[in-house]
Amino acid sequence: MKPSTRLFKLADYCEKLGSDRFSFSEWISEDDGKCGTVCCLLGHAPGAFAKDPKWKKAWYVAYLEDKTSYVELDTDRLQRLFLEEGMTPEELHCAFIWHLQEQFWAQKGEEAENLTIESTLEEALANLRKLAEYIKSTGR
C-alpha cells in the first residue's frame, strides 16, 4: 500500500474512534508500573490494519511478575513497516512525534506549528492528512 493511502486510512480510523481514545501523553501508575496511555496515532496503526498480519503483530500481550497482562506496542516494528512502504524517517517523525512538525514543514517552504503534548485528535489528524497529501503529491 502506498504510504499516503495508509496515512489517510489511519486518519479515518482514528477519527471514528473519537478523541477519548487519543493522547500524546503517557502516564505510569505508581502502583503497578504499567503504561496507561490510550494511544497516539502510531499506537492505533495495528488496529487500523488488523487484517494485515504484519501490522497486527505490532501489538502483543506482555505479562507482569504478578501474572497480570496488558497490551504492549512494538513501536520499532511499526516504524520499520512505515519505512518499508516508502516513508522517509523525516515524514515518519512529522506524522507521529508531537514536536517535529514545524521543522519538517519549514524544510518544505511551509509554515506550521508543532503539535504539543496537549494537542487534540483533530489537530493531530489535520497534520496527518496534510502529510498524506504531501506524500501523495510525490507519487507515493
Image (cartoon, rainbow, N blue to C red):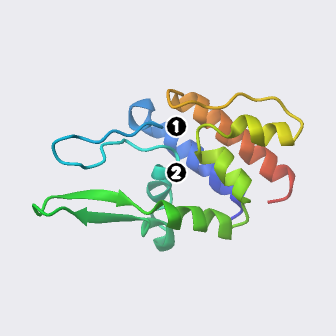
Inspect this view and state whether residue 139 appears. Answer: yes
The quadrant holding residue 61 is bottom left
Residue 134 coordinates in the image, percent (x, y):
80, 46
Compared with 32, 83 (above or below) is below
Q: Check the image and name the residue furthest to the front.
A: 30
Asked which secondary structure carries label 1, the reply is helix
In this view of the protein, which residue sits in the foreground, 130 or 116?
116
Q: CA distance from mark 2 to mark 1?
A: 13 Å
Residue 1 coordinates in the image, percent (x, y):
67, 65
| 5 sits to left or right of 68 | right
Residue to which mark 2 is pinned: 42
Q: Check the image and name the residue furthest to the left.
A: 66
Count how many numbered circles sit on residues in the image. Answer: 2
Which residue is at a point 52% across and 51% down the rendered structure image? 42
The quadrant holding residue 94 is top right
Tag 1 or tag 2, which sits nearer the N-term?
1
Residue to which mark 1 is pinned: 15
